[in-house]
Amino acid sequence: MPESYQNFIGGKWVPARSGETFESRNPANTDDVIGTFPRSREEDVVAAIDAAHAAFPGWRRTPAPLRADVVRRVGQLLAEHKDELARLETREMGKVPEEGAGDVQEGIDMAEYIAGEGRRMFGETVPSELRDKFALTARQPVGVVGLITPWNFPIAIPTWKIFPALVCGNTIIFKPAEDTPACAARLVALCEEAGLPAGVLNMVTGYGPEAGAPIVEDERVRMISFTGSSVVGREIASRAGRSLKKTMLELGGKNAMVVMPDANLELALEGALWGAFGTTGQRCTATSRIIVHKDVLDTFTKRLIDQARKLRVGYGLDEGVQMGPLINEQQLQTVEKYVNIGKQEGAKLLLGGHALSEGQYAGGYFFEPTIFGNVNYRMRIAQEEIFGPVVAIMPVSSYEEAIKVANSTEYGLSSSIYTSDVNTAFRAVHELEAGITYVNAPTIGAEIQLPFGGLKATGNGHREAGTSAIKEFTEIKSVYVDYSGKLQRAQIDVEHHSV
């Protein structure tokens, strides 16, 4: 019998009020049911918001260093259960255990980093224009926040949101992706074990229109942090805007890696393979476009095809597997659709292009590593996010053309250039339209101590991680203390306040 999971509301594990459930299945073997989960609806979300709203006054009054201590303990528990969680990620999401462990490590790193911010959370102290007056800023929590997370990093992305939100004094409604609720439930259980007070963190599982939308609509939720598609992000921004609530959106990407003639080709090939096919291409930072100078195009292309052909696809818990399945049938169909679009547009299919469904692949959502050549930047496969193991090789004749092609999409998350010329590298840092630029590394691999996010349709200007996380999950208050003992009128020009 598959395990039966529940929502976490007000410090208690409870079923959906309707009694309805849904299943989470292994994308490598759909006969493997990981568990059943509450199919939450508005009444469950309202109960969770009630609990968070009630818990907020006590949690905000808890000193930030003490709030941070709880987060630090969660990080320690993540470290203790790292292997277990990595295997669960392989089973529920499909990534190989090495990647799953890396995902958990991101959560451990975030706990360690953001816990330190509990003793910082800096404001500013500035001189006043008046005598005997003190002027400063202080950070205060936003209130009840709604956190809606995707399935591709089922531990890391929730911790990127939950941990800073907690340290800053907010209470939380957490809605994880319906494809990876077991990972989310395990994370929440560790937060409970670490001693988080009842009602501070609440989790409801279910589908976006049924469990996500009510979080966005409820006016008591003062902030929404969402990671997912640009289509859904635009809808959230529109709905949240009606009640003027804060939104932090981390959306799609169509990331480009530029390979110049003076690049270390061995390093560039290694980066391209990992950037394009790591996590089966299911990353918002995946290297989905490789812009290659014509001087090295033939050599680079041939060698990339040779190396991609050798990648072993399969269930991540099987020995030697390097690339797992896609997350679900819908994503498999999306990848197939874009392969057909690429062929119809005149791109040359150089490798792959087919779903894998026979033998060991039966019952799973597997797809071959796929490489297109002769791709023009106007083609849909060069413009639209595919979210699968499909990469487009795009030839260019100059650095200037490479930058033009790289900047030609509506997205601007991550970018990369391989070159041995320091001048070219620094030009690219300034000219690539992206929130992240790597030099001599692929487009993936964020570190938690720097801001994460992008430009254009990739988001709405906010950033996760780094000190930006504290800024996002707090409101600034300006404070004036007048100890003169008399009325001093601001904005009144009395001989420029006289020296």
Image (cartoon, rainbow, N blue to C red):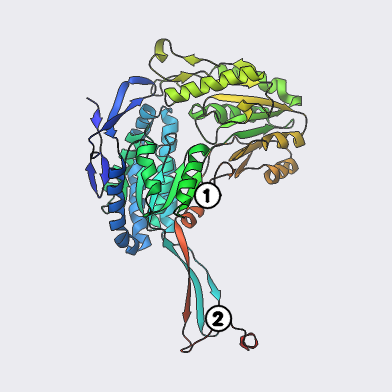
Residue at 55%, 81% in the rendered image: 490
Q: Position of residue 302 (x, y in %)?
A: 66, 18
Q: Is residue 139 visible?
A: yes
| x and y percentages locating residue 98 in the rendered image | 44, 31
Horizontal side, residue 492 vs residue 238: left or right: right
Earlier residue among tags 1 and 2: 1
The kind of secondary structure element at disc 2 is loop
Nearer to us: label 1 or label 2: 2
426 to 370, vertically: above or below: below
Q: Residues within 10 Å of mark 1 (few under 14, many from 20)?
A: many
Say which of 294 and 486 sits in front.
486
Judging by the rendered image, the residue that carries numbered circle 1 is: 463
- Give the camera-side residue of 213 and 77: 213
| Location of residue 138 in the rendering, given as x and y in whole percent from the top left corner | 46, 67
Question: Would you call the spot at circle 2 few (<14 residues within 10 Å), some (14-19), or many (20 or more)?
Answer: few
Task: Name which residue type carries label 2.
Answer: Ala
The image shows residue 201, relative to residue 185, as above or below, that is: below
Q: Quadrant of the C terminus?
A: bottom right
Residue 303: x and y, percent?
A: 64, 20
Give the label on residue 490, or none.
Answer: 2
Q: State left or right for residue 262 relative to residue 19.
A: right
Residue at left 25%, top 27%?
Answer: 2
Q: Nearer the viewer, residue 1 or 86?
A: 1
Q: Amino acid at mark 1?
A: Arg
- For mark 1, give the secondary structure: loop
What number is the disc on residue 131? none
On screen, residue 413 versus residue 4, left or right, reads: right
For residue 434, what is the image quadrant?
A: top right
